Image (tube, rainbow, N blue to C red):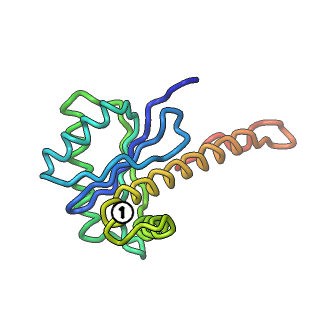
C-alpha cells in the first residue's frame, strides 16, 4: 500500500473553521474537527500544526461566493485568510504544499441535509455543521480533481485518425 500526502479542507467562517481530511490513500473525506477561531495568527499556527501532524500535501479552502458567482464580504475575508496561511507556510519554510480553492456554494445546505438525515437535533447539528461542510468541500475537490485527471487522460489518448498523432496534448484548467 502506497501512502500519499493527505488533503485537508477548510470551511473558514468568522467564528469557526470546519476541518476535513482525506485518509492516507486519498479515497475518503472525513471530518476532523470544528476549530473555534482565536485570531488570525493563532488560527494559522494551528492549521499549520495540523498540516505537519497529518502529513498534508494539499490545503483546500472553501471559497464562499454569492450564488451568482460574485464575491461577498466573507469571500474577501477568506481570501485574506488564505494569504495569511500562505505567508505562514512560506515563513516556516514549507513550499511544497499546494493551496487551492474549492467553490463552496451550497456546502452548508448540503451539510445541513446530511445531518438532518442522520437525525441530529438542531443543537447537535450546530456543533458539527462546519466540519460537515468541510467534508463536502473536500469531497467536491476530490471529485473535481478526479474529473480533471480523466479529461486529461482522455485528451492525451485521443489520436488523429489520419496521422495517428495525439489530437490534444495540452489541457488548461
**On the image, numbered disc 1 is attached to which residue?**
129
Q: Residue at x 40, y 49 (%)?
A: 31
- In the rendered image, residue 86, in percent from the top left (x then y), is placed at 26, 42
- In the image shown, does 27 or 125 lie closer to the viewer? 125
In the rendering, at what x and y percent does residue 5 appear?
A: 44, 31
Is residue 114 depicted above or below 68 in this figure? Answer: above
Which percent across, then down, holds residue 126? Answer: 31, 66
In the rendered view, would you say 162 is above or below 141?
above
Q: Residue at x 23, y 34 (%)?
A: 90
Q: Position of residue 35 (x, y in %)?
A: 25, 51
**Residue, far right:** 162
Question: Based on the displayed image, in which of its 4 quarters is residue 70 positioned?
Answer: bottom left
Q: Quadrant of the N terminus?
A: top right
Q: 35 above or below 8?
A: below
6 relative position to 34: left or right: right
Quadrant housing residue 37: bottom left
Quadrant of the rendered image containing residue 65: bottom left
Q: How many marks?
A: 1
Label 1, secondary structure: give it.
helix
Q: Residue at x 47, y 68 (%)?
A: 119
Amino acid at each position: 500500500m502506497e501512502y500519499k500526502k493527505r488533503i485537508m479542507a477548510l470551511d473558514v467562517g468568522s467564528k469557526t473553521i470546519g476541518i476535513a481530511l482525506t485518509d492516507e490513500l486519498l479515497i475518503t473525506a472525513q471530518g476532523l474537527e470544528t476549530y473555534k477561531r482565536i485570531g488570525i495568527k493563532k488560527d494559522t499556527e494551528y492549521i499549520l500544526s495540523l498540516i505537519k501532524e497529518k502529513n498534508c500535501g494539499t490545503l483546500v479552502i472553501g471559497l464562499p461566493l454569492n450564488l451568482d458567482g460574485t464575491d461577498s464580504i466573507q469571500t474577501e475575508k477568506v481570501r485574506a485568510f488564505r494569504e495569511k496561511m500562505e505567508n505562514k507556510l512560506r515563513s516556516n519554510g514549507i513550499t511544497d504544499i499546494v493551496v487551492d480553492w474549492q467553490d463552496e456554494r451550497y456546502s452548508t445546505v448540503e451539510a445541513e441535509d446530511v445531518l438532518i438525515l442522520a437525525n441530529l437535533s438542531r443543537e447537535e447539528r450546530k456543533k458539527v455543521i462546519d466540519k460537515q461542510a468541510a467534508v463536502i468541500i473536500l469531497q467536491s475537490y476530490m471529485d473535481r480533481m478526479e474529473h480533471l485527471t480523466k479529461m486529461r487522460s482522455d485528451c492525451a489518448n485521443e489520436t488523429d485518425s489520419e496521422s495517428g498523432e495525439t489530437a490534444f496534448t495540452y489541457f488548461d484548467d
